[in-house]
Image (cartoon, rainbow, N blue to C red):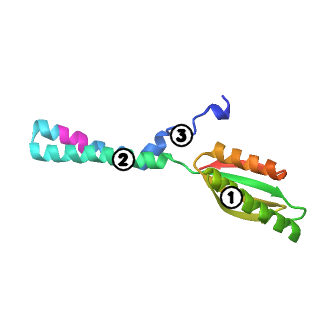
Amino acid sequence: MARDAVPSRAVDLRDIWKSRLWAPALPFVLGMVLFWTGPRLLGVTLYVAGFLGFLAGGMYWRRQSRRAAFVTVHLPFSSDFGTLAERESYQRLAETLEERVQASGAGEYDGDGAGDGTLDLYFIGEDEERLARVLRAALKAEGVAARVSSDER
């Protein structure tokens, strides 16, 4: 199956376990048992607490499912840290890319890092494909050959 065919927000049971979404089940089930077998007031209280916990857990899960997408633009230098002219040129390019990404609503500029013969420009957004598409189009419009890679965390 191609990478594009895999949903980006697939549910992983380990994430549910770590998020403690399952935690409200205990008072919910205990409340039902106590309501029918013992002290009804305590049973209703636990049942309601468990139900409210499920609602809160669902809101937490929806918030957590919006994972950030990180996209990096790799610009080559002629040496380890490039020449002054290269760095200034890439700084202007970074400002242009930042403006285009923000204008499109795809994300925002998150800084840069230089070394080992490249300057890496970091961008963050919610949709990895959209952010990479905007960056590739902006680089093409500027006539710059750069590698764009993504890393969804």
Q: Is residue 74 visible?
A: yes
Residue wearing tag 1 = 99
> Mark 3 is on which residue type?
Arg
Residue occupying the far top of the picture: 1
The numbered mark, 2 or 1, whose residue comes first in the sequence reads: 2
Q: Position of residue 18 (x, y in %)?
A: 44, 49
Residue type (three-letter) at the residue carrying disc 1: Glu
Mark 2: secondary structure: helix
Question: What's the distance in space between the residues labelled 1 and 3, CA to CA?
Answer: 28 Å
Where residue 2 sits: x, y (%)?
A: 68, 31
Residue 71: x %, y % from top left: 68, 51
Q: Is residue 81 left or right of residue 39?
A: right
Q: Earlier in the sequence, mark 3 or mark 2?
A: 3
Residue range highlighted in magenta: 27-32
Give SS at disc 3: loop
Mark 3: few/some/many CA within 10 Å (<14, 14-19, 20+): few
Q: Is residue 28 magenta?
A: yes
Classify mark 1: helix, strand or loop.
helix
Instruction: Measure the C-alpha gap from mark 3 to mark 2.
Output: 17 Å
Disc 2 target residue: 57
Q: Main secondary structure of the magenta part?
A: helix
The numbered dot on residue 153 is none
Residue to which mark 3 is pinned: 9
Residue at image location 54% in from the left, 48% down from the top = 67
Q: Answer with the quarter of the image where residue 120 lies.
A: bottom right
Q: Residue at left 17%, top 38%? A: 33
Residue occupying the point 85% across, 61% down: 117
**Mark 2 or 1, closer to the camera:** 1
Q: Quadrant of residue 48?
A: top left
Identify the image quadrant of the N terminus: top right
Specify few, some or many for label 1: CA neighbours under 10 Å numbering under 14, 14-19, or 20 or more.
some
